[in-house]
Amino acid sequence: MEGGQGRVTRNNPALSGVIWDVLVVGAGPAGSSAARVAAEGGASVLLVDRARFPRYKTCGGGLIGISLAHLPASVLPTVEQEVREVRFSLRGGASKSYRRTLPFLALVQRERFDDALVKAAVASGVRFEDTVVVKAVEEADGLVTVTTDGAALRARVVVGADGTSGRIGRYVGVQNRGTDLALEVELTRTPESRAYDGVIAFDWGTAPGSYAWVFPKEEVLTVGVIQARGEPQQTRDYLESWLRSTGLEGLEVERSSGHLTQWRAPDSPLRRGSVLVAGDAAGLLDPWTREGLSYALRSGCWAGEAAAAAARGSERALEEYTRRVLVQLDPDIRAGERLLHFFERHPRMVHLALAYTGTGMKLFLAVCDGTRTLGSILSHRLLGRALRMFGS
């Protein structure tokens, strides 16, 4: 195998002369996981990202049980809060709380979390280059050439994990459904905000499919809202209203940001030739909650495993990656679509089910713990029949 030793470097034109087994574009959770697993599988791996690391990323930073199970041990210390209480409210009204002794969610700051994942990949032998902007992708004669702003990089297999609007996803032909706008602020914590230690809050909004959240971190509170793109002022108004109803409007805003989320169409491709997509680049997230970290970590690990095997000559490895995503992740995405459509029509029913029934809370906690998935829950005959009765 031709390749370099694992270390963090800056954009280096000299890498043009190297043929890598695996090139990973995008160093978020999906990309760094793919790079690490491919290197652990014996591949020479180059990981690149357009940003300079460490970098800020808009995200609630919630890790459910499935996510935690796919993390290397060195990343676990980035967890800043363990959640033991959840509060639900409807349209800014009175909240209903549930608390248990065992934590059911872990919270991270993406800047530290993503940086730790990259360092875990580097420790496994991955070469990392930041501030690399991909310009074009081409496959010929058994190699994929990725042209960047500073070099032409060649690899036997490429994994695209460069986000919703990334160059690799466009090359593969990813087709997504739905576009949501999330707005988020990070607020400086004060002694009074300690009431949110170990506590998360959700509010179901007035716009169809919208909701708001408060996620506590070590030094900040992450507060945000999300709804379908198209009414940006309405989204901003919802955020301001949510800050007032939580009593947090007086805290200092350290950061204010926004981003778009999308999810894959049922027939969207997951590969083109020797180029795979994973995480947001593949449209892998839950359409209802918009949770994507568990999808990114799982698909990234699987893509890295498949890429390393394909680089060794396995003819079925890349097909197996597609099959794995379609069997294990896509049913949950379709279930999330059904729940989103139901939630858009009946937010009060969803609120009552989650906040005021033991069964609803039990299922919520099971998803957080990683013992159940949305797909397995909606496969229940009676629940599926109930959703159909209400037009979902």
Image (cartoon, helix red, strand yellow):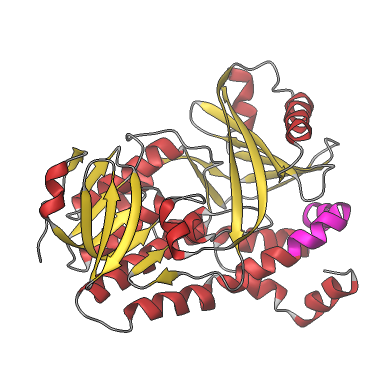
x 64%, y 29%: residue: 195
Query: Taking 223 as reference, is 326 above or below it?
Result: below
* Quarter occupied by residue 303: bottom left
* Majority SS type along the magenta span: helix
Highlighted range, magenta: 339-358
Q: Is residue 35 toward the left or the right of residue 187 in the image? A: left
Q: Quadrant for residue 339, please give it.
A: bottom right
Q: Is residue 314 above or below residue 81?
A: below
Q: Residue at x 61, y 62 (%)?
A: 367
The answer to which quarter of the image holds residue 45 is: bottom left
- Say which residue appears at 34% left-offset and 34% top-offset: 54
Viewer-proximal residue among 94 and 138: 138
- Residue 15 appears anywhere in the view: yes
Query: Which residue is at a point 66% across and 42% down the rendered structure image?
Result: 181
Q: Does the rendering let one see residue 72?
A: no
Residue 347's place in the image compared with 251, above or below, is below
Q: Quadrant of the N terminus?
A: bottom left
- State the image coordinates of residue 19 (x, y, percent, origin top left): 15, 61
The quadrant of the rendering that contains the C terminus is: bottom right
Q: Nearer the viewer, residue 371 or 26?
A: 26
User: Where residue 29 sits: x, y (%)?
Assistant: 40, 51
**In the visual, does 263 lie left or right of 386?**
left
Asked if the stretch drawn in magenta spans residue 357, the answer is yes
Magenta run includes residue 312: no
Relative to 41, is 299 on the left or the right?
Answer: right
User: Measured from the top left, where is residue 125 in percent x and y?
Assistant: 17, 54
Residue 22 on image: x %, y %: 24, 62
351 vs 229, nearest the viewer: 229
> What is the total number of numbered labels drawn onto the structure image?
0
